[in-house]
Image: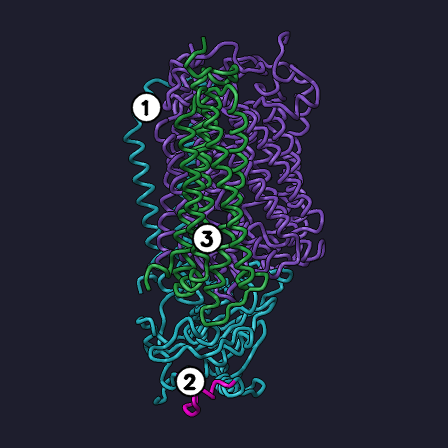
Amino acid sequence: MSETNYLTTDYTLRSWFLTTDHKRIAILYFASLIFFFFIGGAAATAIRIELATPQGDFVSSDIYNRLFTMHGIIMVWFFLIPSIPNTLGNFIVPLMIGARDLAFPRLNLMSWYIFMLGGCTTLFAIFAGGIDTGWTFYTPFSTLYSNSYVIVAAAGVFIAGFSSILTGLNFIVTIHRLRAPGLTWYRLPLFLWSLYATSVILVLATPVLAITLLLMATERFFGVGIFDPRIGGDPLLFQHLFWFYSHPAVYIMILPGMGVINELVSCFSRKQVFGYKFVAWCSLAIAAVGFLVWGHHMFVSGQSLVASLVFSFMSFIVAVPSAIKVFNWTATLHKGSIHFDAPMLYALGFIGLFTVGGLTGLFLACLAYDVHATDTYFVVAHFHYIMVGGMVTAYFGGLHYWWPKITGRLYSEYWARAAAILIFFGFNLTFFPQFVLGAEGMPRRYHVYPPEFQVWNVLSSGGAVILAIAYLMPVFYFGYSAFFGRRAPANPWDAPGLEWQTSSPPPEHNFTSQPVVTRDPYQYDEDFHAEPQNA
Amino acid sequence: MWRQWIPFWQPGLSPHSGDVDLLFTGLLIASALVVGLLFFLLALFCARYRAGNQTDRNHRVKKSWHWEVSWTVASFVCFLALFVWGASVYFQIYRTRSDEHDVFVVAKQWMWKTQHPGGQAEIDALHIPVKRPIRLVMASQDVIHSFFIPALRLKHDVVPGRYQDLEIEVDKPGHYHLFCAEYCGTDHSGMIGEIVAMEPADFSNWLTQQAPSSPLASEGGQLFRELGCSGCHGGRGTIRAPPLEGLYGKPVPLSDGSTVIADDKYIRDSILMPRSQVVASYEPLMPSFEGKVSEDQLLRLVIYIKSLAGRQS
Amino acid sequence: MRSRKMPDGSAFAPQYASIPHRDHTAELGMWVFIATEVLLFGGLILAYFIYRHAFPHGFVEGSRHTEIVIGTVNTAVLLTSSFLVAWAVEIFSPATSRIATWLLMGAACLGLVFLVLKGIEYSKEYDAHLVPGIDFQSAGPLADGVQLFFILYFIATAIHALHVLIGICLLTTLATICRKAPTTRHHTALRSAALYWHFVDMVWIFLFALIYLPGRSSS
């Protein structure tokens, strides 16, 4: 590598912490997210150690309640929501779109600083003594009864919300206005359609979280009763406002993963994604309908029968576009030429695990069964299948796929495949027993449990050990690759996207000349040789 | 009954739980078929179309429309069927029957207090007769809890500031777990108990063997006098207040022109927020008892007023 | 000879293809930001409507205790300030930069007048014991509804006032930097700031109707 790239233009700390280069900001996020992932993972480890035995012999119940709250808050707001959008999205979106940067680079840097401020505030709450309300902050427990750092933690999440909003804003404007000449909407890679849908949710849903947390914190701090039943306030109003944001938030935590899978499945089948337009519009459909289902978290809360019926029906509807995507990915493999590189192993794992998670969502959308399964481990298993089995798997797949582009190095394919397989195995062993636990009636957020639930809990904790090892493996082989790996060519996967038409790593301004797009995406032709989009 | 024709079908502990289990089995079979099909296709395609395999890759499917429409419609039809099935079983929870036996439940951090109309009280336990619908009237003294009986596949949140109704019925005697299913603080996982279902004769014996205490209705009557309610509602005295005899269950015309039915919620709201619903032709003079009565006392007052339902006003 | 056309100003950032490209992109950014603000205030207004539905008489009673005179004057103040901002955007050019600056400063001053009047209003409500959490005293049958009304009133107007303050800073900054040799970049920034200011004004119109008018329309 004789010419400079974005990593080598300047080595000073100032050039990193005051950068406006989207690629460097992506690296800043990546480092922060690894840190938060391991904190959230430490909480999960402690939880699974405690749950291996029915008694509360590892930590006290107050500590346990703080552990699962911290796990939820950190993993949702400080890992999953920023994961793919702020690392892979920040790095790849301008490259994929043929632009030299995002629309608002300084806003992008500000997003990272706001994110770190929110993260530090939340960490302060955790290490000063913790918060024990659950990541859902339900009233009146959070406003009137909890003796923990509720306001500080809520402030941390509130601040991080601004980071989400600004990121979403940046992506929406970038995708609308900075596309290369010839790059029409129907020529966009599906990763961008997914990120666009994600950004719409980020921008529209997060403000509702902001106002909800503000109302809750105001009630707690000033002693005014917004959700207080003693002056006629309604605790359920908090739940409606909270879930109006938090249900679309879970689509923030899966749509980018689905976007990555499109890229992986097409590249490693050497074939365009089957039903491109359907998959594109399904992303938008999931985002739109996802705003209309929040009441399915409240079927047993006392909301009206009519409301429950409507929310159940809409929850079934929102599953349809996801099902369509799974069918389309499977059809993409048909008559393709399939390579089982690590990214593809992750993509296949995603399809399987997301399908299981999605189908169990149907169990929960089903009114009569949800009455039994809600607030049990069935729900815990369901959302971990989607968020970890789905989103984290997709994140890892994307990391492996774009690692050569980001770092200019190749990673060890042997260790990567081993880790992928171990993750799949460890994940299923951890979370499948939790479906059984939930079906048998073990409630969630339980520090101690009746002894008949122990067998499944031990299996789950055993799986967690394997999963922890599997998640540590990439630290080693990626770390090795970053410093000692073989240099990567510009296009190690022989893929046609614009991001592969520039060097690995890219130069500071991405392209030496403005790319022009003349073809549809995913043009892997009959000779299984990629035709670049701007040929 | 049509259910006995289903292979391997077992009646559950209650009609409702049997139906929920049937629904669960249906969901499980549908999911297994989908997952099975998907894994089969993935495995097939991965094996057959592995890079380097010499198979026919020509004539790829180009036009996707009929595939897309087919699997979209198929998904939608299956989901619709599941929705209708789930909703129809759900409606059963909302039935009310006339021969219900009432039980009153107060949830507080971190215990369940259950009370029978005769005054028998239990903590973290509930004795009930089998094959009889039991109507649980539930209130919370502090935060949101959730009354969960896994064996019956039923739960309902207990939200402070309102009453919740849940109808349960058990067909087989036995001991069944009772859990709190909504996180409520430090000892949330300690807020567990048991439902003890007994044959009707055993249940009657149990009721009489409990420590003697007055029925909830007479305790309510005592409170009614102690708190001064009878001063205005007793029929004598200078203040004109709506009579409560024969009130429960009847429609009440309000001063804003609307009409409400005098149920548990109405009575509770009238004690705590009396001027939110003023009876037509009466002055809004009743003071609020917010903060002056606990949920236990409120329940007893409600039961007492309910006991006046048969009298003439 | 001085050109009549607005000068283009400094070179544009590399991700843009041209000056108009940059400027149109910035405006789209402001529209997306306005969308997020709509959802923020929307959540609050939703809570207002839910409680108003539950406590109709309480909310009407609470509204009768608001300072309708101050509220109406404030509405006129904000509408006038929006008018001044719109005027500034309309006439903005190198020849009229001084006038535009005066208009923007006028709008900012009116914003300050709004905040001062709001402060006076808050102190009057404090004296009338209408501030929940501090010393709210409302005897009477509708106390719960009145209290909820005032909780939402203080939160909504406080958040709105914060937005007005941010707007004042924006207008003042723009007035300062637009004084000398304004460029298309300044014009775009002005249009974006004007959009924000008009939005804040519109939120006030909604709040005015929901806070001051219930119960005053009929005798």
CA–CA distance in space, label 3 to label 1: 70 Å
The verdict on residue B230 being magenta is yes
Q: Which mark is residue C70?
A: 3
Q: Quadrant of residue C89?
A: top left
* Residue A534: % across, % down: 43, 12
* Residue C12: % across, % down: 51, 16
* Residue A78: % across, % down: 60, 39
How many neighbours does mark 1 have within 10 angstroms: few (below 14), some (14-19), or many (20 or more)?
A: few
Q: Are marks 3 and 1 in contact (CB under 8 Å)?
A: no
* Residue A451: % across, % down: 62, 60
The correct choice, above or below, for C114 with respect to A500 in the image is below
Drawing shade for chain A: purple
Label 1, secondary structure: give it.
loop
Which of label 3 and label 1 is nearer to you? Answer: 3
The correct choice, above or below, for C124 with respect to A188 in the image is below
Query: Label 2: which residue?
Result: B307
CA–CA distance in space, label 3 to label 2: 54 Å
Give the amino acid at mark 3: Ile
Given the current orientation, which residue lies at the most extreme left position? B66
Q: Which chain is green?
A: C
Residue B128 vs residue A486: left or right?
Answer: left
Disc 3 and disc 2 on one polypeptide chain? no
Dot 3 falls on which chain?
Answer: C
The verdict on residue A96 being magenta is no
Label 3, secondary structure: give it.
helix
Span of residues in magenta: B228-241
Q: Which mark is residue B61?
A: 1
Given the current orientation, which residue lies at the most extreme bottom position? B236
Q: From the image, which quarter does the N terminus of chain A lie in?
A: top right
**Residue at the spot 36% in from the left edge and 47% down from the top edge:** A314
Drawing shade for chain B: cyan
Q: Is residue A363 visible?
A: no
